[in-house]
Amino acid sequence: YNWGEGSVQRAIARNQRAGLPTDYSSLRMPNETQFYVPKLQAVKNIVLHPDAYSLSLPPLSNHPYFLSVPITRDIDVDLAAKFAGIPTDEFKSLNPQMNKPVILAAGTPQVLLPYDNASAFIQQMSLHRGPMASWTAWVAPKTVRPVDAARQVGMSEAQLREINRIPPRMLVRAGSTLLVPRAAHRQADVSERIAENAMMTLTPDQPAQRRVSFKAGKKDSVASIARRYKIGAVQVAQWNNVDVSASFKPGQSVLVYLTNTPTRSRPTRHASATRKSAPPTRTASNKPTERVAKTDKAPARTAAGE
């Protein structure tokens, strides 16, 4: 133990050169080796000859400590642990791959249980007459927000996110399989097709953007355009395949994507009968269509060259 073959041979050779015995007790060795090996020998002697030490060893059956037990029905992890007669934490430690609250028979055909608990588990499953699973699989028919998916399946958004590990600001893409509460009237287990192909794909929940293209003016650069539109310089550079520190040539096409912000309708102010209304052509708020039409052109620069 902790003393290799070469070390043993060198200790024997050293004693031989000194004219000393080469038996175990005469060799110089680490203390942990010196005291550990006799303990192993003692265990061997006790097992082989228990009567010599006035001992009676209990019988030890020749079988594996754990057994793989088939799962034929969808079943909650807590209920499976109860059927096996072991704590849920112990059940999960034996089956660490089961990190969801339910075991799908089509996806997990067997579980690992202590030998003495396996038969009890099988018997309890055969005797149980009520529902075994309170969860099932739901396939998103379209890309949805978690709050909308939760509303469709009858659970809170927080619970849906926790069970399915959905981070904030993400959408559930169409075709994703989520774990949701199982309706009381639902008798069928999750099909093999759904269980084997189950996967969840997410996409960032980003606001809609519009594409704006215009011609660069004098002194236009990635940095100045980023400041003008209040967007990131790195994004401007990526959209136009240039370096972050690059400048644009006058007349060069520049592309940016701007977030669509909802327009708020302003209340109409009715002019008094005794006051003249301002000419409509001189009121900036009366020309919204003209502003929208000019989004593809570079915004007018101030005298400071912005």
Image (cartoon, grey):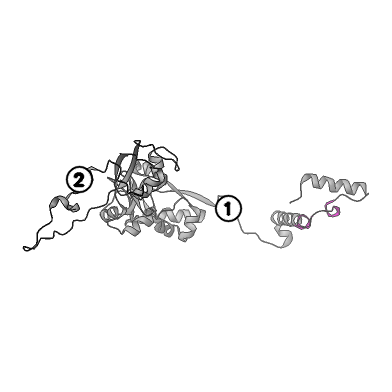
Q: Residue extending furthest front? A: 303
109 to 46, vertically: above or below: above
Q: Nearer the viewer, mark 1 or mark 2?
A: 2
In the image, residue 31 lies in the stretch drawn in magenta: yes
In the rendered image, residue 298, in percent from the top left (x then y), is placed at: 30, 42
Tell me if 280 is positioned left or right of 50 in this view.
left
Give the residue at x 34% y 47%.
Answer: 177
Residue 105 is at least partly visible in this image: no
For disc 1, the marked residue is 61
Q: Secondary structure at mark 2?
A: helix
Give the residue at x 13% y 60%.
Answer: 269
* Residue 84 picture quarter: bottom left
Q: Say how many tags the image has.
A: 2
Tell me if 238 is positioned left or right of 6 in this view.
left
Say which amino acid is labelled 1.
Ser
In the rendered image, residue 219, in percent from the top left (x then y), is placed at: 39, 42
Q: Which residues are magenta?
A: 21-35
For disc 2, the marked residue is 290
Q: Are marks 1 and 2 in contact (CB under 8 Å)?
A: no
Say which amino acid is labelled 2.
Glu
Q: Nearer the viewer, residue 151 or 101?
A: 151
Q: CA distance from mark 1 to mark 2?
A: 90 Å
